[in-house]
Amino acid sequence: CWGYGEDDGPFFWHKGYPIAQGNRQSPINIVTSETVYDSSLSPLIVSYEHCTSISISNNGCSVAVEYADTEQGPVIEGGPLSDAYRLKQFHFHWGHKDYHGSEHTVDGKTYASELHLVHWNTSKYQTFREAAAASDGLAVLGVFLEAGEEHQGLLKITDALNMVKFKGRTADLKEFNPKCLLPKNLKYWTYPGSLTTPPLHESVIWIVFEEPIEVAKKQMEKFRMLLFSQEEEDEKFMENNFRPPQPLKGRQVCASYN
Ligand SMILES: CC(C)NC[C@H](O)COc1ccc(S(N)(=O)=O)cc1
Ligand SMILES: [Zn+2]
């Protein structure tokens, strides 16, 4: 199947997923001088009070924290969104070193990692799977991570990573509220895009925060001790699990601020 290696990586994905060469693929390089301030963008409303996280798992391409699919679950609305979108999971992408690893780039700048909080439109669709195939089905919040001070809120995640070292491993992770992973300043860019891994569905309204959060180098190193491989397979360290920027194809990136 697909991966991030030299023979199954992003440059090969189009063979199994032709949409990889579509007109609204993600990630992109955000050219700040070409973003357009959109005064009609209302503030983003993040309602993460009821946060019933279930588990943290190594799915072989990233590490993800899953949320229960309940009515009163954590939701986002406002901003570019016309409906309420419920948090399903969050995961990360990172590099071999701190100078790269993010998926989106800003004026060509790469960050050490990028957090994706994946939400689906519960106003219009019955399941995540259905929403993931619809043009307005998903909303993903992107948060850049850069090496700096230790991130207290992230400790609960980075300290759990040794329990999910191998592909297919899952561990309990209860009541984790990811609000602490958002930057102080919620200024964002937004544009229509896609999943950044196969099946690469063009179903994502991207909301990328301008301000990165700081995490300690030793916290970043803990992500790099995860494995793409299962126990008993030859060890392949999970790193560089990011797709490079894709052609903009005429899309406009809107800014929430002037
Ligand atoms: C339901 C089917 C479509 N399965 C989808 C599968 O879980 C992958 O889902 C995703 C979800 C989010 C992303 S990203 N990096 O763009 O935030 C990529 C793949
Ligand atoms: Zn992602």
Image: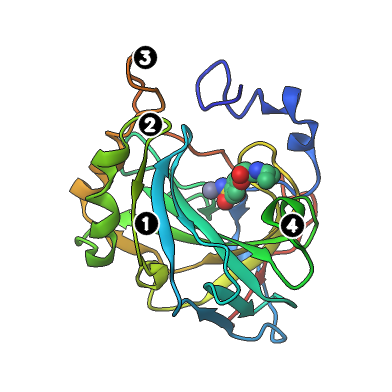
Instruction: Give the residue drawn at x 74%, y 57%.
Output: 131
Q: Say if 184 sits above or below 114 in the image.
A: below
Observer-side mark, 4 or 1, equals 4
What x and y, as percent, mark residue 126?
A: 75, 62
Q: CA distance from mark 4 to mark 1?
A: 28 Å
Q: Quadrant of residue 256?
A: bottom right
Q: Amino acid at mark 2?
A: Met
Q: What is the crowding at mark 2: few (fewer than 14 residues within 10 Å), some, or many (at least 20)?
A: many
Q: Say if 109 sits above or below 206 in the image.
A: above
Q: Is residue 125 left or right of residue 85?
A: right
Ranked by sequence position, the earlier of labels 3 and 4 is 4
Q: Would residue 102 be visible to someone looking at this image?
A: yes
Q: State the residue position of label 2.
A: 238
Q: State the residue position of label 3.
A: 233
What x and y, as percent, mark residue 27?
A: 61, 48
Q: CA distance from mark 3 to mark 4?
A: 35 Å
Q: Which mark is residue 131?
A: 4
Disc 1 secondary structure class: strand
Disc 3 secondary structure class: loop
Q: State the residue position of label 1.
A: 145
Quadrant of the rendering where the C terminus is positioned: bottom right
Instruction: Give the residue drawn at x 40%, y 52%.
Output: 55
